[in-house]
Each structure stands twice: as C-alpha cells, then as structure tokens.
Image (spheres, rainbow, N blue to C red):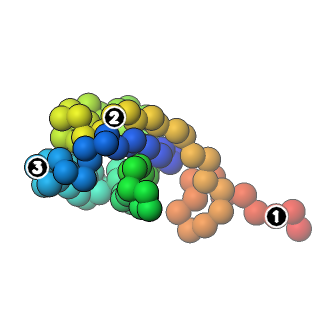
Amino acid sequence: MKHYVLFLEFSDSYEARRPEFRDAHLTKAWAAAERGELILAGALTDPLDTGIILFRADSPAVVKRFVREDAYVNNGVVRSWRIREWATVVGEGATEKVYPAA
C-alpha cells in the first residue's frame, strides 16, 4: 500500500457554490473512509483555496476513481486537481518506515 495526496484547487466561486454539492461530496468521502481508502481530508484556509485528501491504496486508480465521481469536480467547484504519490517514512501510519542507522 502507498499514500497518495489529492490536491483540489478550488474555483473562485467555491464558497458560494460549495453548499449545493457538499452533501454529495461528503457522502462519497465518508464512504471512501469507511473502505479504508481515504485517511484524512479537508481544506487549507486563509486563503480558502485548496483541498487536500490523503488516500492509502495499491495504486492511484483509487484516487482517480474518486475524482471522476466527485460532485465538486464534476460541477466546477474545483478548477483543477492533481495526484501525488507520497513516500511516508516516519510515523505510525507510514507505509515504508525508515529508522535512523544504529
């Protein structure tokens, strides 16, 4: 398993349009969390311009499927998105733990 980070760049109308699609977005996100795919999700604030979602999966296909079906993306609340693999090495949930040399 690997970690993948999904960056969602919000449109200029994000705050005004978010309420219309928020329940659909959250329903999808919580379902992914219950399956163990989505680890954490939320928005960067001040300014409120980017969402970040951390996934744990075998491949980025899980993240791409989420994006293809997401209400924010499909309704223009998100202007662009990108997926990055994150090599996590320290911490309880790290996928490839690396310890200091003795």
Q: Is residue 6 left or right of residue 86?
A: left
Residue at point 40%, 35% (across, down)? 81
**3D distance between C-alphas at marks 3 and 1:** 49 Å
Estimate the x, y position of residue 64 in percent, counting from the top left.
35, 32
Estimate the x, y position of residue 30 in percent, counting from the top left.
23, 57
Q: Which residue is mark 2?
A: 79
Q: Which mark is residue 20?
A: 3
Q: Secondary structure at mark 1?
A: loop
Q: Secondary structure at mark 2?
A: strand
- Please tell me whether residue 21 is drawn above or below residue 69 in the rendered image: below
Give whichever of discs 2 and 1 has the lower sequence position.
Answer: 2
Q: Is residue 33 left or right of residue 88?
A: left
Q: Is residue 37 visible?
A: yes
Residue density around tag 3, few if under 14, some if 14–19, many if 20 or more, within 10 Å: few
**3D distance between C-alphas at marks 2 and 1:** 41 Å
Whether tag 3 and tag 1 are in contact, CB under 8 A, the answer is no
Q: Nearer the viewer, mark 2 or mark 1?
A: 2
**3D distance between C-alphas at marks 2 and 3:** 16 Å
